[in-house]
Amino acid sequence: MRKLLYILLVAILLCSGCTKQPTSPNKIPMTSGHRGANAIAPENTMASADSCIKYGVDYMECDLCISKDSVFYLLHDSTLDRTTNGTGNIGDWMSADIDTLDAGSWFGPEFTGQRVLRFADLLRKAKENGLKLTIDYRNGDIQKLLTMIKSEGMLKNCNFTFYNEEMTKSFRKMAPEVKTLQAYVKDEADLDRVVKEVKPNVVVIWLDSLTPEFVNKCHEYNLQVMALVLGLDDKTIDNQRTVDLGVDAIATDRPEQFIMKYGKSNIGK
């Protein structure tokens, strides 16, 4: 009887040793809210930033341009017509007048009174609440912008992106200390050139152009990969692909939906 019990015990131990170890959870990408959480609040406003903070979005992407008196504001179009009750180019308006405009009622009556957001105000809000920023620079004194960011101790928490590659290259030469420079890449064949000429820290690419091999190659270069998954249509399948591919960040118009589905990012945690 003892011999039988001994044999059973050995068999149990052997089986437990052969049991497959649980796999580590999938890497959950960081979320970058395109113009904030712009599906639930007016884009590039404090209400949009507050929504990002509420849902634990990692980055708020924002578009920066300047007033006539060189104050940095958040505005995507450069013209005021679409998202405010003002008209014309923001560069033709003084900041005192811009501050009187309504930038929320176009989205919904509950947002009446939202203002065209000064970047300085967003910067302080972001620092206070642990929100990082992706700055899509349009115009203005870039050195002044960097000084503002550094004065708030936010340089490491701001990604920088530019609408053309030449501006990206110029910024890299001007601010080599920045470790969060983004660059757009068309496909895997374009990667080596961009790495050599631009020296980015983050590569940005449309999801449809991504492959596992591309992601691995970027990681071998010690680059982060941000997948563009923009638009307000159903992104359920695309969102899952970003997780399956192991990208580092997803740029999305619905960051709150991504987080509600997958939870907050576990990168670096």
Image (cartoon, rainbow, N blue to C red):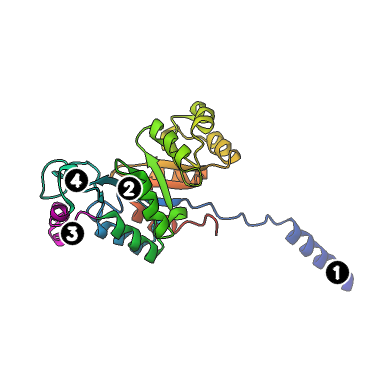
The disc placed on residue 68 is 4
Where disc 3 sits, the SS reads: loop
Please name the residue shown 49% across and 44% down the image.
247
Identify residue for label 2: 34
> Residue 174 at what x, y percent from top left?
45, 40
Q: Amino acid at mark 4?
A: Lys
* Label 4 crowd (10 A; few <14 / some 14-19 / many >=20): some
Question: In the image, what residue type sits under mark 1?
Answer: Tyr
Considering only order in the chain, which callout, 2 or 1, is on the residue closer to the N terminus? 1
Closest to the camera, between mark 2 and mark 4, is 4
Is residue 135 shown left or right of residue 70?
right
* Range of residues picked out in magenta: 96-117
Q: Is residue 221 above or below residue 74?
A: above
Point 55% across, 56% down: residue:
268
Q: Amino acid at mark 3?
A: Gln
User: Residue 6 shows which numbered tag?
Assistant: 1
Predominant secondary structure, magenta span: loop
Q: Are marks 4 and 1 in contact (CB under 8 Å)?
A: no
Residue 114's disc is 3
Q: Could you give the CA–CA distance between mark 2 and mark 4, rounded to whole angstroms?
A: 26 Å
Q: Is residue 108 magenta?
A: yes
Q: Is residue 178 above or below residue 268?
A: above
Q: Nearer the viewer, mark 4 or mark 3?
A: 4
Q: In the rendered structure, which disc, 2 or 4, sits on the residue that comes first in sequence? A: 2
Residue at image location 68% in from the left, 54% down from the top: 20
Q: Position of residue 14 (x, y in %)?
A: 79, 60
Question: Label 3 neighbourhood size at 10 Å, few (<14), some (14-19), many (20+)?
Answer: many
Q: Is residue 235 visible?
A: no
